[in-house]
Image (cartoon, grey):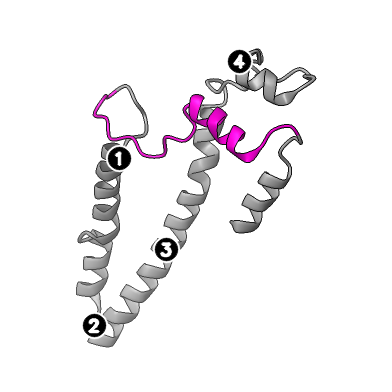
Amino acid sequence: MALAFGIAVHRLPADLSFTDALSIAGRMGKLQAVDFSIDPSKRYTVWSGILGGFFLSLSYFGADQSQVQRYLAGGSLRASRIGLLFNALVKVRCNSSSCSSAPWFFSSINSKSRRSFSISRPTSARSKLVTGEAEPAPDSI
């Protein structure tokens, strides 16, 4: 992450300092990492994350029917333990595949709702961004 940060800072335009970039990002609302509001129209808040995390942990660590069934159906303690191990291996693979495909799925759904800003070859990148003359680009399909 430090390397990516260094590359991003190095590739800033020559007339745009790091502090100027931070002030522009702050004015655009991009530095608000944590939102504690309880407004239901806001999509990502701390409270939605806690609620989602609660149900996620219930699904991961709760008493799962397949685990109980494998434990009870084993003919011996060793067979029950092996059954639980195989159940865990299958669940880890299923959960990792669903977690890796979820960002792709939601980004494809939300692609129409995103707005991108384009800056038409300014004489000074800083002057266009600071004065707010950068026009939003038309919605792309």
Taking the image as shown, residue 116 lies to the left or right of residue 121, namely left
Q: CA distance from mark 4 to mark 3?
A: 48 Å
Q: Please provide percent x and percent y for residue 29.
A: 47, 27
Please tell me whether mark 1 or mark 4 is closer to you in this view.
Answer: 4
Residue identifier under label 1: 46
Q: Which mark is residue 132?
A: 4
Q: Is residue 115 visible?
A: yes
Check residue 60 for magenta coloring.
no
Question: Which residue is label 2 attached to?
Answer: 75
Q: Amino acid at mark 2?
A: Gly
Say which of marks 4 and 3 sits in front.
4
Q: Position of residue 68 (x, y in %)?
A: 21, 67
Disc 4 residue type (three-letter): Gly
Pointer 3 residue: 92
Sequence-first tag of 4 and 2: 2
Q: Nearer the viewer, mark 3 or mark 2?
A: 3
Q: Which residues are magenta?
A: 15-40
